[in-house]
Each structure stands twice: as C-alpha cells, then as structure tokens.
Amino acid sequence: MTGAKGVKLKETHNLQTQENFNNFLKDSKNQAEFDRRVQKAIKTAKEKELQKKIKIIEKAINYWLK
C-alpha cells in the first residue's frame, strides 16, 4: 500500500506493536528476562569491541618490534 493510506496503516501497526510490547513488559518476569537479554547483548558487544582493539594494538606492537 502506498500513499497516505499506507503511511496511516504503518503508523497504526507501529502503535499497536508498541502497546503490545509495553503490555508484555508489565509482567515482571518478562521485564526481568528482557533486562537480562539486553545486558547480555551489551556485554557481548563490549567484549567484541575490546577484542578488536586488542588485535589492533597487537598488530601495531608487532609492526614496531620488527
């Protein structure tokens, strides 16, 4: 669907999805699980970034020690 009807339909769907998600998080078990997963994702992203930085530093050290 295109045009104004398509935009309105998409906005309505987005609002409904957001409301459903908010209702889902009202359950403390769901909120706790969501929080755990977000924290795990953040930790994983930080660890991956740290590993990238370590590799860059190791390459630089190896270059300068040659």
Image (cartoon, helix red, strand yellow):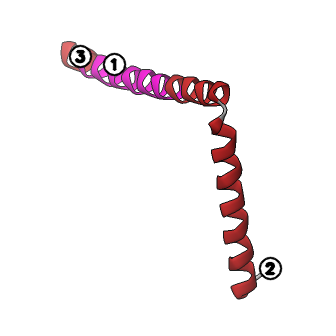
> 52 or 28, which lies in front?
28
Q: Residue at x 47, y 28 (%)?
A: 42
Tag of residue 1: 2
Tag of residue 15: none
Whole-number angstrom distance, CA of label 2 to CA of label 1: 49 Å
Q: Residues within 10 Å of mark 3 (few under 14, many from 20)?
A: few
Q: Residue at x 71, y 87 (%)?
A: 3
Whether 14 is drawn above or below 42: the answer is below
Whether 57 is drawn above or below 1: the answer is above
Position of residue 11 measured from the top left corner of the image (x, y, whole percent):
66, 70
Look at discs 1 and 3 and give the one toward the viewer: 1
Q: Residues within 10 Å of mark 1 (few under 14, many from 20)?
A: few
Look at discs 2 and 3 and give the one toward the viewer: 2
Q: Amino acid at mark 2?
A: Met
Q: Amino acid at mark 1?
A: Ile
Mark 1 and mark 3 lie on one chain; the one further toward the N terminus is: 1
Instruction: Write down the region rendered in magenta.
Output: 41-61
Position of residue 44 measured from the top left corner of the image (x, y, whole percent):
50, 23
Quadrant position of residue 65: top left
Q: Amino acid at mark 3?
A: Ile
Evaluate if marks 1 and 3 touch, with contact meaning CB atoms under 8 Å apart: no
Whether 3 is drawn above or below 58: the answer is below
**Residue 61 placement, left or right of 5:** left
Mark 2 and mark 3 lie on one chain; the one further toward the N terminus is: 2
Look at discs 2 and 1 and give the one toward the viewer: 2
Q: Residues within 10 Å of mark 2 (few under 14, many from 20)?
A: few
> 13 or 54, which lies in front?
13
Q: Which residue is mark 3?
A: 61
Tag of residue 54: 1
In terms of secondary structure, where does tag 2 sit? loop
